[in-house]
Amino acid sequence: MLNINPQEVGNQESFKYLVGAVSPRPIAFVSTISKDGINNLSPFSFFNIFGSNPPVLVFSPSRRGRDNTLKDTYHNLKETNECVVHIVSYDMIEKMNYASSEFDSDVDEFEKSGFTPIDSKLVKAKRVKESPVHLECKVLEILEIGGKAGSGNLVVCEIINIHVNENVLDEKGHIDPFKLDTIGRNGGNWYTRANGNALFELAKPTGIGIGYDKLPEYIKESDYLTANDIGKLISHIEIPSIDNANKYINQLTKKEFNKVNFEFYERQNDCESMLELLLNEKVNINYFNRVVKVALSQRQVEIAWNVLVYLEGK
Ligand SMILES: Cc1cc2nc3c(=O)[nH]c(=O)nc-3n(C[C@H](O)[C@H](O)[C@H](O)COP(=O)(O)O)c2cc1C
């Protein structure tokens, strides 16, 4: 592997690898107000939440890599100790990008970028009407780390008020990621849009699964199961016994093998119908492997295990 020592390669080179690797990063679109009443609006992707009781977020208006100067957002936070952090949806990105330009500190960046300022409830900084989620914040602490070009200033904030546009909620009142349509920052000029195929569900593990260490060798050594297939198998609660696997197979209706029908059911992700075609005569083991793949792709892990155990016992 490429080995990079940040001390040896310097800030610019490390930055390149870090922002390329730690990605996509969420984007805080931060509104502050100067002590003279000038509105500021800037995006920061060194950002995340770090607790919910009290609700805490952290972002970093860093020292400029170019000349080690500090940003207006940092100065405003030092002076006023408050801000509003906004979530950026896809339809905001062009104006958000424009708002990241280096405007003089006497420029109202709401006016300049065309976002609509609306009053906050608990802080003086304005909110961005176009954003789906607004987090009013009080600064708890600013951790200044390094003091060199590119050094971070970690702004630790308590979120004291949350606004969510009802348009991004589902029928249960939860935030619907498709409606939020948020964006993340990658390295270079790359962004990620959290929508379409980029979104997928993965349920949390329930109970303690089998684990890789308990996996039979014939599964560890299989050449058709991917790392994610193995991950699903080891998350299952227990390996079925041979008796149970046979019982499962024997309750299926045996049908005559027919390749066209098999592939039809494969396209339908119907692994039980696929299996029923394999039980009568001697068919190539690869067909069983294809059933296992379909079962795993559909998260029917119990079926996949039953087939694997049945095959091993045959
Ligand atoms: C998507 C995006 C993410 C950014 N993330 C950061 C960041 O995490 N930290 C930072 O210091 N600058 C970041 N920048 C650059 C600042 O937005 C930029 O320096 C801005 O001009 C600062 O404005 P200010 O001087 O008004 O505070 C980012 C820019 C973009 C477009």
Image: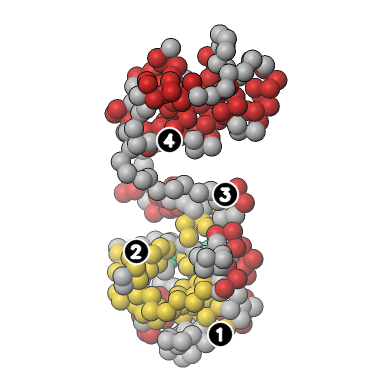
Label 4 Cα neighbours within 10 Å, binned few <14 / some 14-19 / many ≥20: many
User: 65 or 56, which is in the foreground?
Assistant: 56
Which numbered disc covers residue 118? Answer: 1
Q: Do the residues labelled 4 and 1 touch (CB within 8 Å)?
A: no
Instruction: Return the residue at label 2.
Output: 50
Q: Earlier in the sequence, mark 2 or mark 1?
A: 2
Q: Which residue is drawn at 53% across and 35% down?
A: 297
**Residue 305 x %, y %:** 43, 27
Task: Tell us which disc is closer to us: 3 or 4.
Answer: 4
- Alpha carbon of mark 3 to alpha carbon of mark 1: how far? 32 Å
Per the rendering, the mark at residue 232 is 4
Tell me the distance, in whole angstroms, between the alpha carbons under discs 2 and 1. 27 Å
* 304 versus 20 height, above or below: above
Look at discs 4 and 2 and give the one toward the viewer.
4
Tell me the CA gap for discs 4 and 1: 48 Å
Classify residue 263 as left or right of residue 159. Answer: right
65 or 36: nearer the viewer: 36
Q: Is residue 178 visible?
A: yes
| Gap in angstroms between the C-alphas marked 4 and 2 | 29 Å
Q: Which of marks 3 and 2 is nearer the N terminus?
A: 2
User: What's the distance in space between the residues labelled 3 and 2, CA to CA?
Assistant: 24 Å
Instruction: Compare residues 181 and 235 and report the one nearer the observer.
Output: 235
Residue 247, compared with residue 163, is above or below; it is above
Which callout, 3 or 1, points to the residue nearer the camera? 3
* Residue 258 on image: x %, y %: 67, 16
Assess disc 2: are there few (<14), some (14-19) or many (≥20) residues with their C-alpha within 10 Å of its C-alpha: few
Q: Mark 3 points at which residue?
A: 198
| Mark found first going from the N terminus, 4 or 1 | 1
Please name the amino acid that badge 3 sits on. Answer: Ala
Looking at the rendered structure, the kind of residue marked 4 is Lys
